[in-house]
Image (cartoon, helix red, strand yellow):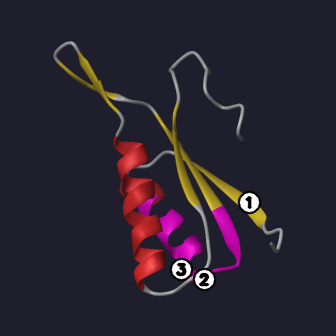
Amino acid sequence: MKLRKVVSVVGAGNVGEHTAALLALRGLVDVRMFDLPKKDGDRLIEPVKGKALDIQQMLSALNIDGKVEGYTVSADGEGYQAL
């Protein structure tokens, strides 16, 4: 297995998601995305994980070797260990 550099993208809104996708499509780096969860009543939704999975599946469909992971973080700074 070839070791690749990792680029972290903090924020998975429109700009962060597109930046992560463009980085991953180049196939030169693995990407880690970090973002806060969203609230839906009492439930916490983790869209960053779904966005990372979408990009990962796109890479597979295009036969591009790469890894994209999504991490949910908290407003007080928890969850950035993988950074």
Give the alpha-carbon distance from disc 1 to disc 3, as whole Å: 14 Å
**Magenta highlight range:** 17-30
Q: Is residue 19 magenta?
A: yes
Q: Residue at x 63, y 80 (%)?
A: 27
Q: In the depicted view, which residue is nearer to us: 3 or 13?
A: 3
Contact check, label 3 and label 2, Cβ < 8 Å: yes
Mark 2: give few (<14), some (14-19) or many (20+) Cα within 10 Å.
Answer: few
Q: Position of residue 30 (x, y in %)?
A: 66, 65
Label 1: how many Cα within 10 Å (few below 14, some 14–19, many 20+): some
Distance from label 1 to label 2 (Cα)? 13 Å
Q: Which of the two discs, 1 and 3, labels the residue nearer the N terminus?
A: 1
Task: Look at the picture and state if 65 lies above or below 50.
Answer: below
- For residue 49: magenta? no
Alpha carbon separation for disc pair 3 and 2? 4 Å
The residue that mark 1 highlights is 6
Which residue: 51% across, 22% down?
74
> In the image, which disc is placed on residue 55?
none
Q: Amino acid at mark 3?
A: Leu
Disc 3 crowd, CA 10 A, few/some/many (<14, 14-19, 20+): some
Residue where numbered disc 3 is placed: 25
Specify the amino acid type for callout 1.
Answer: Val
Q: Residue furthest left?
A: 41
Q: Quadrant of residue 77?
A: top right
What element does badge 1 sit on?
A: strand
The disc at residue 26 is 2
